[in-house]
Image (spheres, rainbow, N blue to C red):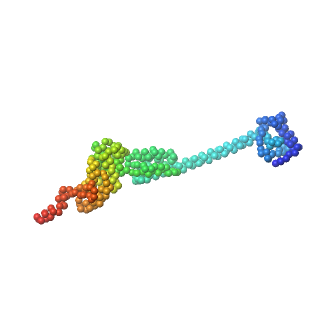
Amino acid sequence: MTISKRNTADRAAMRDKHYECFPDRSRKKAADPSCRLTTKNPGTRYAPSHNRTDDPFFEGEATGVVFLRGADKKKKKGEARSGKLLALIIIVMFFASVSVAAYFLMVVDSVLVTGVSDDAVRRIIELSGIETGSHILSVDLKKAKAAIESDPYFKVNRIEREYPSKIVIEAGQRREAASIEYMDVNIIIDNEGYVLFIGKRDSTEGLIKVEGLRLSGCQVNRSLGETPDIFIYTLLEVLGALKDEDFLSSIKTLEVSNPLDIRMTAINELHIVLGEADRLSEKLESLKEVMPELERRGLLNGILDLSIKGAPVYSPAPQESEDNDPGEGSGQEGDD
């Protein structure tokens, strides 16, 4: 009930009721712990019932102050404290539920490997140590990359998380390109000079046999070109050019003992002179053009010189020259 004005009789009655609550204290010194003061909006005052002596609220004379009994105040504080505790429990349970859901959403369910053959995919996943069912944030990508590249035949171009539950590995596979015979062992390298294998092999068929290369030492999973060397540089330049022109499978031997006079033997036994390791792309393009014609005519035992600018020069082998000499042939026919 809102009262804007009070008459003198009402104020006297309220004052008497106040003194009943505090019989031994004046209104100004009512500091008994059992009767605390609490303020309310002065614009809206509480009017106690004059017929109830146990009403817990008693309003001050002109200040808008309400007196509250200690037991009732403790009860209300307890209810407020219980409400806050319940709200805290609900919040904690909510965040716990969200955390559990997020954990299971971010469990690795697949590892995608690209850039290699199907057999290599299984090998890479095995080497990486990444297991499905583990949390995606617990996967150590650097460790997985190092583990994969411990096999010299594999290289990792990219490895990353693809949220929420996938690991993507973009890999490459090194191919054997050449074999170097060194101290009774075979050093197998790719077209970039990366050492893939060191040991004895019964057969190196299908690989370019490198001759005349001077080595001071090498290690598996390391590149030959880590130390400056004119012979290694020459070898890598030629292998790179052969790879670019798709000629690796057409060459049988590669002689690099003299970087100014590089020589090769094709699988069809044609001897090829490259000269210096310059204009390699141009020289190999010329080789592509003349090789079919030489094969058609059976001129494969001679020497094809690509070191001279311009058209390549073919020099037949001595026996081949005698067999194909028109003058000698016609002379023999005349004698018969």
The residue that appears at 31% across and 42% down in the rendered structure is: 216
Instruction: Name the residue rendered at 85%, 40% in the picture.
Output: 15
Question: Would you place residue 292 above or below residue 201 in this image?
Answer: below
Residue in the foreground of this view, choosing between 117 and 253:
253
The answer to which of 165 and 212 lies nearer the viewer is 212
Residue 246 visible, this angle: no
Where, by quadrant of the figure, is residue 56 drawn?
Answer: top right
Residue 60 is situated, as x and y percent measured from the top left of the image, at: 82, 41
Q: Indicate the position of residue 311 as horizontal and vertical percent values.
A: 27, 59
Residue found at x 51% / y 46%:
137
Q: Residue furthest top?
A: 24
Which residue sits at x=37%, y=50%? 174
Q: Residue furthest right?
A: 9
Let me know if residue 172 appears in the view. yes
Q: Is residue 277 left or right of residue 148?
A: left
The image position of residue 285, as x and y in percent, is 31, 58
| Residue 136: percent from left, percent from top | 51, 47
